[in-house]
Structure formats: structure tokens, C-alpha cells
């Protein structure tokens, strides 16, 4: 199966704010960024197109001509729980310190750990592979893209944050 993963375009959120599960606005540059993504996807067809249900992904999918993607909650970004829409400076220092010391296993309060997110992304990937598709496209988030790289054994989960994923970037794999 050919798998295309597309990260959403730039968000209009201040630097250093946790916004994983939050539905945040896109920057004014959306149309220009989305046009580049659309151009890079031109001519590609897919058996199925999936999108995170967050508008930063669904709007890009629609702009690129995929009016009704399959909304898939398992490819949402990390749930920061009570930390959503707070800057690292606002987050309780001991809790943030614990998370920074073990971001793989320590969940944000009322949120999830990276390992919990990995389980849901892996579950999606296992199901996707069972469909026996020739091609699929995902409109998703940096964390999901990194975890799929880990799922595909390109690098280990503890190295995922070392891997840059730019806004509007497209990744292509043969699985």
C-alpha cells in the first residue's frame, strides 16, 4: 500500500502553547500553504482518505479536493488534557517537570501520555493495513506522523521528537 501523510498547515497559536486536541485557528497564510500542498498532491488518487476531525486537518483535506474524508479520531494529536491552550509557563511546574523527564509514559493531567497516543495510532495503522488498499492518504498532525515512522520501524519512539515535521509537509511510504 502507498501511504501518503500530510501535516496540516500553520496554526495561529502563540509559540510554546500546548494545543494538541484543541481545535485552533489557522494562520492567514492558509490559502497559500494549502495551494502548495494541493499542487504536491496533484494527480494522486487514493482508495481512502482519512482526516483527523480537527478543522486544521479537515479544512486542508477539503481544500485539496477531498470533500468528505473519513474522520478518524485515532489520528488526532496528543491530548494535553488540562494543559490544552496553556503555555509551558502557565503549567504547574512539578507536573511539567515530570512530563519533561518522562514524556513517553507521563500523561498530562486529564490527558494522555505519548505511549497512550502510540497505542491508538498503532491500532489505526493495524486496521488500515487490514483493508488491503492500494493507496491511502492521511491529513493529520506532527505527533501522528512521527509515531507512524516509529510504527514502521524507521526510528524508535524515544527518537521521534528529534525528527522535524514541517507544516504542510507530505510523507510517502510503501507499506
Image: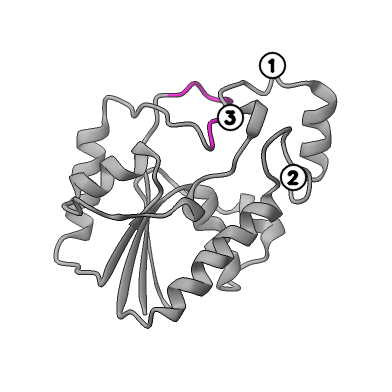
Measuring from the top left, give residue 11's x and y in whole percent: 40, 31
Which residue does the image show at 31% across and 44% down from the upper left? 58
Q: Residues within 10 Å of mark 1 (few under 14, many from 20)?
A: few
Quadrant holding the N terminus: bottom left
Q: Is residue 87 magenta?
A: no
Residue drawn at the location 63% of the way across and 67% of the way down: 155
Look at 70% across and 34% down and name the residue there.
Answer: 110
Quadrant of res 157: bottom right
Choose top left, top right, bottom left or bottom right for residue 147: bottom right
Q: Is residue 85 left or right of residue 31?
A: right
Classify 40 as above or below 92.
below
Residue at label 3? Answer: 18
Res 5 visible: yes
Q: Position of residue 145 (x, y in %)?
A: 49, 56
Place of residue 169 in the rendered image (x, y in percent of width and height, measured from the top left): 37, 51
**Residue beneath label 2, please?**
103
Mark 2 closeness class: few <14, some 14–19, many ≥20 residues within 10 Å: some
Amino acid at each position: 500500500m502507498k501511504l501518503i501523510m500530510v501535516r496540516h498547515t500553520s496554526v495561529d497559536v502563540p509559540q510554546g502553547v500546548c494545543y494538541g486536541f484543541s481545535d485552533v485557528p489557522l494562520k492567514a497564510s492558509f490559502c497559500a500553504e494549502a495551494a502548495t500542498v494541493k499542487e504536491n498532491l496533484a494527480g494522486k488518487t487514493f482508495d481512502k482518505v482519512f482526516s483527523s476531525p480537527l478543522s486544521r486537518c479537515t479544512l486542508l483535506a477539503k481544500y485539496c479536493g477531498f470533500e468528505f474524508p473519513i474522520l478518524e479520531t485515532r489520528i488526532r494529536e496528543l491530548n494535553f488534557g488540562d494543559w490544552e491552550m496553556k503555555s509551558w509557563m502557565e503549567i504547574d511546574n512539578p507536573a511539567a517537570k515530570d512530563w519533561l523527564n518522562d514524556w513517553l509514559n507521563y500523561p498530562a493531567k486529564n490527558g494522555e501520555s505519548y505511549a497512550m497516543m502510540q497505542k491508538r495510532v498503532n491500532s489505526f495503522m493495524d486496521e488500515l493495513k487490514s483493508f488491503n488498499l492500494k493507496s491511502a492518504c492521511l491529513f493529520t498532525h506532527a505527533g501522528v506522523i512521527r509515531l507512524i515512522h516509529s510504527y514502521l520501524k524507521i526510528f524508535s519512539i524515544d527518537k521521534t521528537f528529534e525528527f522535524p515535521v514541517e507544516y504542510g509537509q507530505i510523507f510517502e511510504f510503501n507499506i
